[in-house]
Amino acid sequence: MPNRLSLSDFRAVLFDVDGTLVNSVEVIVCGLDETIVHFGGPKPRRETILAKIGSPLRVQLHEYEVPEVTEDKLEKMFHFAIERFDAYAELEVPFQAAVNTLHLCKERGMKTALVTSKSRSELVSFFRRFPATEVVDVAVTSSDVAHPKPHPESAELACQWLGVTPQEAVLVGDSVFDVCCARSAGLSTVAVSYGAANRSMLEAERPDLLLHTPEELFDWAETAFLQSPCHERS
């Protein structure tokens, strides 16, 4: 795919979290595995868990074969899963070059946002261990919108909070949910294939740019800034 998209064309950059800034696959797999079994469901296949990453946790939990899932039981499953995620937090590893990209964007005067399917309570827990919290201007979670990703509302709200138009922003994410959300909202899309998503599925969504490693993401951002004058973006 030709590299025609330049970060210097935008005022704001929106990042997905899981699979884009951090490798949280093992945290999610272990936590959901324990949750489903604890509440009476069969042990889920790893491939099944991976395919659901990118959608809100409550949505994921509803899709597993757990018997008699009432709203009360779903809420208990949700909080149990978050506790298990916290228990496995040491397995979460930042994609350092991707985190460096976030830092670089902020240093060069861009507005920054996280657009995640995590709930607000999940994000609070995540921010305690995330090494770049201080360079995030706003964060939109599934708790902040009526319709989470892949619906465009999350990206639209992030742009609203940042004070930019969708055409002035680009979203970086590792799932088809991210690409669909951004495109429907009118943003440009950068898909990264180093997360949990299937690469061929990302290619089928035809993002504006597809990158394969965190280092490629950083190089893409750095090249844009090197090729354009460094100035404060208003």
Image (tube, grey):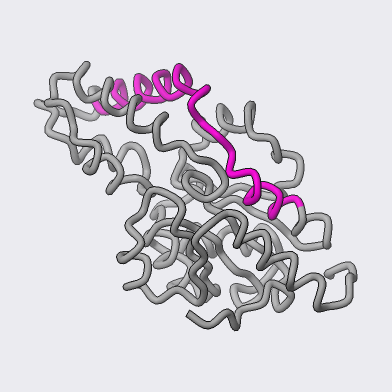
Q: Is residue 55 above or below residue 43?
A: below
Task: Determine whether 151 is above or below 93 in the image.
Answer: below
Residue at point 13%, 19% (across, down): 40
Query: Is 93 in the magenta?
Result: yes
Which image quadrant for residue 149?
bottom left
Q: Residue 173: give x, y in percent of width and height.
A: 49, 58
Of the pair 50 and 166, the residue shown nearer to us: 50
Q: Where is residue 194 shown, x and y percent of the image?
A: 46, 53
Residue at 51%, 31% (x, y): give it. 92
Q: Position of residue 77 (x, y in %)?
A: 29, 24
Q: Residue at horizontal 39%, vertical 20%?
A: 84
Left or right side of 158 for 133: right
Magenta residues, start to end? 74-103
**Residue 124 in the image, given as x and y percentages of width and height:** 58, 30
Callout count: 0
**Residue 91 placement, left or right of 133:** left
